[in-house]
Image (cartoon, rainbow, N blue to C red):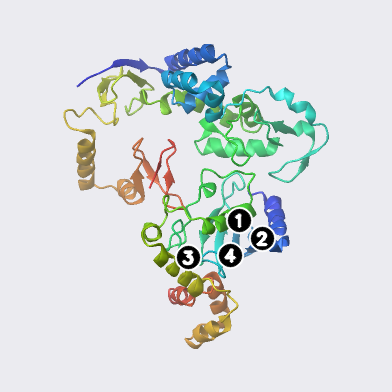
Amino acid sequence: MLDLSRVQKELVDCNRDKSSGVSIDLVGDQLSHLAGTISGPIGTPYEGGVFRIDIRLPDGYPFEPPKMQFVTKVWHPNISSQNGAICLDILKDQWSPALTLKTALLSLQALLSAPEPDDPQDAVVAQQYLRDYPTFLGTARYWTEAFARRVSIGTEEKVQKLVEMGFPEALVRTTLENAGGDENMALEKLCSG
Amino acid sequence: MTSGCIKVITKESLLVAQREDLRKIMDLLAVSEKHARTLLIHHRWDAERLSAVFVEKGSDRLFSEAGVTVVEPNVLAPLLSSPVTCNICNEDVSADAVTTMNCGHCFCNNCWTDHFIVKINDGQSRRIRCMAHKCNAICDEDVIRNLVSAKHPDLAERFDRFLLESYIEDNNKVKWCPSVPHCGNAICVDGDAYCEVECTCGLQFCFSCSAEAHSPCSCLMWELWVKKCRDESVTDNWNWIIVNTKPCPRCLKPVEKNGGCNQVRCICGQNFW
């Protein structure tokens, strides 16, 4: 039932507009599995980072909301620091078929700019945000620096390091990419097979 | 143990009981049956509270909060003559293949139908909102019935059954009799909900938690006791429920998180973590 023509059109429309700071790519050859990227909003601790989001489209899309999850680790009250799960109303009961993947990604970008610590997904982060804002800023900035820098920077070094450990290069590259350039996460995935 | 006025609602008297409340609101506000139903579902079939809101806030606020738009759709329809682009599927469709809801939002009939089918299958058919983002309007039940029955007559029947059963499901004063196999009855209690009732099928149960009558033990204590007894005779199914679900704090049904973040919405409408 997945409306393929609409998804195709959405992909083209979203990627045509380069200024929005969000983009959508295919992951495999299925239109039901996509990867979104959003750039961290300027003036926030996420500035300079590029965040990758795993997008799964249910059969009922666009009448059911897309399932989105951060792949890139991010320190934010409404996003799980463990698994990237997102607490955002429009991805749940406030979803409307008139919204698109692009508007959903833009809403995620807005969520990065304006956290809602009173409605948290990650209680630890939310506590820190409310009680010790300077430390929150520092941690969020550090995570952006450590996990969300542009994947191209230093990728070759990471690939080389992992290849030296004995993993095949092609696998290393795809795993690294799926892990949003996070070397440790990629290693973990490679080890677990 | 206090008890209010207790009434048994059978399959046959359900329609009559619902009509009674609908009639009250239709007379009070001079609205059609479908609008009265939408208003009553929003206010959990509490006609007194609905009247109080009407007196306090006026009919405009009452209608907008419940998602009721009382505009005749034919006021909007003549505006459409040339082909229209549906904002959902991006297809150009002729003006006779689109429907404008009372709120003024217009989409093609195929998209409306798919939207309704997803909601009905999801068990959310009693309050199907318009497809436009942030539009709070509840879709007209006649439109839903017509469009859905053209493609799936069985789902249209289910939609009607859900609307009828809303009187039980969305009503703090009424509960299904928990008899197994189900006798088909529901019990209406006007007054204190913490009481024990007896259905005409002979079953006595606690109206508050739907478990078998357990006074003077409290509902919570009874639930813990039943859980403990079950834990000692674990079956695979029950084990799965313990590991994978949490009871909804409002309706107590086990709820499984099927993805997303930790904020979960039970089909009864309750959000919890």
Q: Is residue A49 left or right of residue B180?
A: right
Between disc 4 and disc 1, the foreground one is: 4
Q: Quick check: marks 1 and 3 in contact, CB under 8 Å?
A: no
Specify the subunit that label 2 lies on. A
Residue at the disc numbered 1:
A106
Q: In the rendered structure, the residue with mark 1 lies on which chain?
A: A
Q: Amino acid at mark 2?
A: Ser
- Location of residue B115 in the rendering, given as x and y in whole percent from the top left corner: 61, 39
Query: Eyeballing the image, is A38 above or below B114?
Result: below
- Residue type for callout 1: Leu
Q: Is residue A180 above or below residue B246?
A: below
* Badge 2 or badge 4: first in the primary sequence: 2
In the image, A75 versus A62, the foreground residue is: A75
Q: Does the CB distance between marks 2 and 1 fall below 8 Å? A: yes
Circle 2 or circle 4, nearest the eye: 4
Q: Earlier in the sequence, mark 4 or mark 1?
A: 4
Residue named by callout 3? A74
